Each structure stands twice: as C-alpha cells, then as structure tokens.
Amino acid sequence: MLASSFDYVIVGGGSAGAVLARRLAENPACEVLLIEAGPSDVGVGAIADPAAWTSLCGSAFDWGHVYAPAPHALGRAIPIPRGRVLGGSSSINAMIWYRGHADDYDQWERDGATGWNFAALLPCFRRSEDWQGGASAWRGAGGPLRIELPQDPHPIAADIAAAAARMGVPTIEDLNGESNFGACHPNLSIGNGQRWSAARGYLHPARDWPNLVVVTDSLVTDLVLEGDRCVGVRHRLDGRTRQTRARHEVILAAGAIGSPVLLMRSGIGDARALRRLGIQARVDAPGVGDRLQDHPLLCGMNFIATAPLGPVRDQGGGVLLNWCSSASDRPDLHGFFVQGAHAGAGLARELPADAPVFALSPGLMRSRSTGFVRLASADPAAPVEIQPNYLADPADLAALVESVEFIEELAGQSPLARHIVRPLVALRDHAERVEFIRRTVDTFFHCCGTCRMGSDDASVVDPALRVRGVRGLRVADASVMPTIPSCNTNAPTIMIAERAAELIAGAA
C-alpha cells in the first residue's frame, strides 16, 4: 500500500535521484518517495561485474534511446545508452570517476549559475567519496561511493603512459587532484571487485529506513499542476495510473533526456511546439530540451596487437590521457585504452576475425556543438527526437583531427610500439582523417544541459534548481549543467545532487 502523499517525491532513481533520496531521508522528519521506471538492480550479475558492463548497453536495463541521424556524421543514427534500472546510468556505465578541471565549474558561475564555482562545489564532491587514498584537500573518505584505482592494470596501460610521456604528456597520480593534464590510471567506482553504483552506495544502506520508500517499475507520465504549483506526479504502478502528491516539492532527477521530456509533457516548454502536439501549454519555457551537449568520441582507433591481451581486467580499460589541442590552454582532448576492439557499426566489418586487437579511443572534452531533445508526440510511450548535432561546430572537427594525429604518433612511440603490428585503418592525409571522424564519431554517454541552470529568464532553472514559473518543482540532474564539464559526467551529476540536497534542506 503506497501512501497518497509524501513530503518529497523524487522522479528517477539514477545517479542523482539515489543521492537525493538518501540525503533528504537522513532527516527522519521527512517522508521521501523515490520513483524509478526500471527494475531493481539487486541480484543482477552483469551490473555487479565491472568487466560485463558493455553487455548492459542495449539490454533490458537500457532505455534504448537513439540519437537522430546526425547531419555532420554521415547521417548516422547513434544509440545513446541510458540506465533504466535503480542506480540509472551509474548501474550500466564504465565506472569512470572523474570530475574534470576546476575551471569547468567556475565557468558555470560565470554563465549565471551563482554559487556553483569549484571552491563551493568541492565539498560536495568530497562528501560523496570513499577514496582509497584517504582524505585530502582534494579527495574525500568515508562517503557512500567507494572509489579505487585498478587493482591489476593491464601491462599495455603502463606502456601507453610511458609513450605519452615521450610526447610531453606527464604521468600523474590522480586525475581528480590538483591537475588533470597527463596520463593516469582511472579512478573507478569499484569496491572489492564489484561496481559501486549510486544505488549501492546511497540507497541500499537505507533500504530499511521507515521514512524512505523506493518504488521500481513505475513510469511517471506527467506532473500534476494546480495553478502555478506542482503538487505531485501521475505514474503507472501495477498496470494502473495513480496520482501521488508532494507536500513540499517534486524533484526531477530523470536525466538529460527524461527530465525535459517530463516537463514538456506536463505543459512546461516551448508553448507553440506543445500546442502543435495537442499539449496544454502551462509555462512558456523555450529553453526546455534545448542546448543538449555530449562529448564526441571516436569509436575507435584500433590496432592489431602482437599478442593476445588475455582476460579483461577491471572494466576493460586501464589508463586515461588528457592533453591540449592547439586551440586550448587547458586539457580538451581525452583518450583511453580499451582491452579489445572498440568499433561501431561503421568500422566493425573491418575487424579481423583471427587476430588480437586493442584500441586507443580519443574524444573531445570541450565540445561546442549543441543539439536538442524534442517531443514527437504527446503519447508517453512514443519515442522522442534527440539530436546531438555532432561536429556542427567546425572547431570540434578541427580538435578531433588533432586527437587522431596524436594517437597515430603515440602508437609509434616506445614502449607502446612493441605491442602493435599495425593500425586497423591507416589514414594517409587530412581528408582521410576527416572522413574517419565522420564515420566513427559516437557518444561518450555524457548527455547534459537540456534544463540549463542560470540567472537569466531564458534558463530553465535558477541557481537553486527551481523551475522558473512553477512553485514546488526542481530539477537536479545532468540536465541543469550550463556547459558540459571536461570529464565523464557521473561524478558531476552526483555532486549536483549533493548540492541540491543542501539547497532543499536549507529551504525547508
């Protein structure tokens, strides 16, 4: 029997929602409901096993979203995995724990997200961590999320770092330390050889708290609005649609796709576009669903190896590289090692059937191209249009050409060169590199920015994460990022939720 009302109703049990539910329920006077569309993560072996994470993409635990054909990427439709399970994308991702450069967040404040500078946000990052190296000015210990380095990194990973050092990219101890320029073993949200998702770290220890209710397999279809106030949600549960009310606030944590979609289906969005779909426009907010950002990843630069790589170690990686393009004074190019082939549909047919392969996959962490999320129908079951506009800004293409040239040179450096017979695809000139980029550009799974936070009237939420024009409603997930940070987005999303919990508690 689910109660008809709670103090707080949180939509989405992913990276942000799990954090919010736990932190708000730490106040025993608050009754908190967390609603997740997908199933529980408990007992799913592929979620717990770090080496099995790629099998989760396209599985029953993935929403199955696909980016619309990208005009500058040869019109290819690109799958964008998003977790549809308790823990959200933290239950299906590659477990990289990385917060980027301090100036990423100082830029948020310059863009109007008052109070969201790095110095103010560092305590939120630290609060979430149980870093194997212990607490420091930069790192946290004792937090809900266990963060470790690879226990037994692949030997090729060390040789990649040594080769990068010959090209002026230093080897550093911690990408989440004072500097992120260099090569480093990745921080991983892994503990005791198992995935440490937001559900495992934040929710499971609180599962018996009487003031926290977690409902899975329940899709929220729209918000309940009375006048200018959000008073609850409509959601499907056990085959029926029911309404659950929030005495204080509804908080959307459904992600960069789910949160703007829920707003638009509830009449909060571009009024003209909503009316065309037969949706009553309650708040004219053209910014909802706009400014979608995702890092472009080249999938991938594969090499025929001189010997088999052996069983997959950790989550199949082992080293990350951050370096600067000619147009940037901060790291904007990123690469990582893959213990096996890394090839999308456009390259998979060229993989050899009888030779070992590994990849060095580069990408752009300060991309400029932006896209959108749009409704195609008022039907909650209908697909939505998600357009990343990869390579729309010529600066992104130029930087990615440099990333390809860097990896080509890196592959010829000692001691990495001893592991390589030849590249899978040999690129002879600039034109072939451009064609390769258009053929292989793919997603880092880092979509964000579709409910932009700011101080101007065009922003969707204010710096307290309150939706403009609607009382009792906030958004707290990757969709509020004003600009995409130069890192994997799971750690920043969890930080946003930690900060949101502070703001909500302060307003109570």
Image: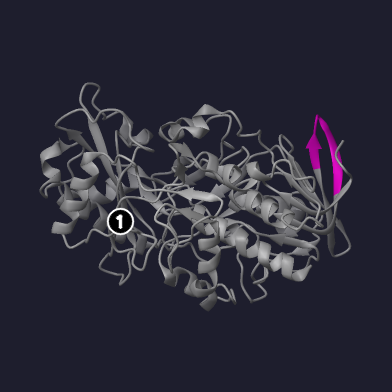
* The quadrant where residue 307 appears: top left
* The quadrant where residue 131 appears: bottom left
Point out residue 145 in the picture as x, y percentages from the top left corner: 52, 50
Point out residue 225 in the picture as x, y percentages from the top left corner: 85, 57
Q: Secondary structure at mark 1?
A: helix
- Considering the whole magenta stretch, tell me its main secondary structure: strand
| Total number of numbered discs in the rendering | 1
Point out residue 439 in the picture as x, y percentages from the top left corner: 33, 43
* The quadrant where residue 352 appears: top left
In the rendered view, tell whether residue 14 sits above or below residue 468.
above
| Nearer-the-camera pick, 15 or 266 | 15
Identity of the residue furthest to the top in this view: 354
Q: Residue at x 49, y 48 (%)?
A: 146
Horizontally, residue 267 falls left or right of residue 173, namely: right
User: Per the image, is 238 magenta?
Assistant: yes
- Tell me if residue 374 can be seen: no
The three-letter amino acid code for the residue at tag 1 is Leu
Q: Residue at x 72, y 61 (%)?
A: 474
Point out residue 492 in the picture as x, y percentages from the top left corner: 51, 59
Q: Quarter of the image containing the N terminus?
A: top right
User: Per the image, is 131 magenta?
Assistant: no
| Nearer-the-camera pick, 419 or 43 | 43
Residue marked by disc 1: 400
Disc 1 crowd rating (10 Å Cα; few below 14, some 14-19, many 20+) is many
In the rendered view, tell whether residue 348 sits above or below residue 431.
above
Which stretch did the figure color magenta?
A: 235-244
Horizontally, residue 59 falls left or right of residue 9, namely: left
| Nearer-the-camera pick, 469 or 56 | 56
